[in-house]
Image (cartoon, helix red, strand yellow):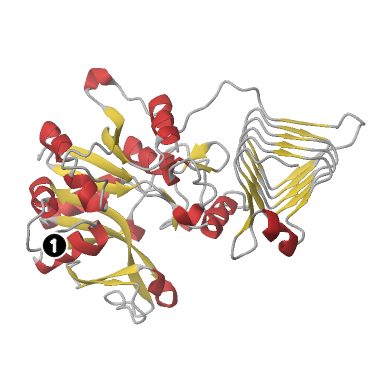
Amino acid sequence: MALDPKVLVMVLAGGEGKRLLPLTNDRAKPAVPFGGTYRIIDFALSNFANAGYLKIVVLTQYKSHSLDRHISQTWRFSTLLDNYVTPVPAQMRRGPQWFRGSADAVYQNLNLIYDERPDIVAVFGADHIYRMDPRQMVEQHRTRGAGVTVAAIPVPRSEASQFGVIEADHDGRIIAFHEKSANPPTMPGDDTRCLASMGNYVFDTQTLIDIVTPNEEEPLFDMGGDVIPALTRQGVAQVYDFSTNVIPGQDERENGYWRDVGTIDAYYEANMDLIAPVPIFNLYNERWPVYTYRKALPPAKVSRGVGGEPAFVDGSLLSQGSIVSGSHVERSIISPRVFIDHDAHVTDSIIMEGVHIGAGARLNRCIVDKNVVIPNFERIGLDRAADAERYTVSDNGIVVIEKERRFG
């Protein structure tokens, strides 16, 4: 029986996340809170932890302090068994410049690969919400003898122009890569769907080293834009259909769930997926859990207000240390240490840690970042024009109140 391959995981977490402003004003995109108690990066790291791939480096760059702290506090494996999750900041090992793209980030950290000497390197993004068993992708990669295997998800042809689309033959060999094409090719045998790249890759180690090492004729800086097309031309690129990935304990409805939370509206909708009556993404799967840091906080509390006002909570997530005191919370995500005072109404909203919502306030379709104090009787999310003069408002009308906002 063949031995399991030695796998090193490189998680790319260095992007600026400009489209998520103001949530990324002072944190990297993978460090943005999600689902009340998690950070976005927890979903990718949990997949590797559940799969037993326990040698993980996280390549960081912009505004990485809260991300570095979260990884250091949360992601600790047994050093006795030589396992680790470690953040690796941009070190300018190859000269005085930041990472010029995802492939350049790997090139500037080739010393990590040389030190570990793995058989396989998994290069995954840090900023998507999904469950995946990467062992199944690695197994296909080895069985087919690919130089690189690219994870892809089937999407309706009508939506495919938003993605990089992979054109593959019936054997899974990648023929071409089409970046946001108006007329993308469909999947073999399925004229209604296209294969959209997820930005997750499995490489043979030497293939990766060779392709990211610059040459004067063709410098390659980006994985999706440069490296994968180059390896496609060499005939060594294969596609992995993510919809075939099997997760223990996962309901059939959740198969193929993957969300790119790169915009405020996409981030909001992915959070709202968690609180549907029968959620399409289930946080309660004990056979493939999502791990994160848990503070020593008391249980969530729902009680009458100081004047005896009854509390009402429906269709919502309440995190530890939160208090709903004689207030109304509906279809919302309430993070740790949030206090919602009597007669306040919070609907269809995401409230992050340490927020205080004053008595009689009304919040509708809002994202409130950490440590904001909402004054008594404040109205947010009810008048788009008025909100746009004071706050960030997304294309779909979601109002975002930045971290530690002070009201006059």
Is 339 above or below relative to 121? above
**Residue at the (37%, 80%) spot, across then down:** 182
Position of residue 82 relative to residue 153, above or below, is above
CA neighbours of label 1 inside 10 A, class few (<14), some (14 to 19), many (20+): some
Amino acid at pointer 1: Leu
- Mark 1 lies on a secondary structure that is helix
What residue did someone put label 1 on? 231
Snapshot quadrant of residue 154:
bottom left
Residue 29 located left or right of residue 402: left
Q: Nearer the viewer, residue 114 or 280?
A: 114
Q: Classify the position of the N terminus by image quarter.
A: top left
Q: Quadrant of the C terminus?
A: top right
Residue occupying image coordinates x 59% and y 61%: 394
How many numbered dots are placed on residues in this image? 1
Query: Which residue is painted at 69% across and 53% down in the image?
Result: 348
Decide if residue 261 is in sight here: no
| Residue 371 on image: x %, y % | 64, 35
The image position of residue 112, as x and y in percent, is 17, 35
Q: Residue 187's spot in the image, x, y percent?
A: 30, 74
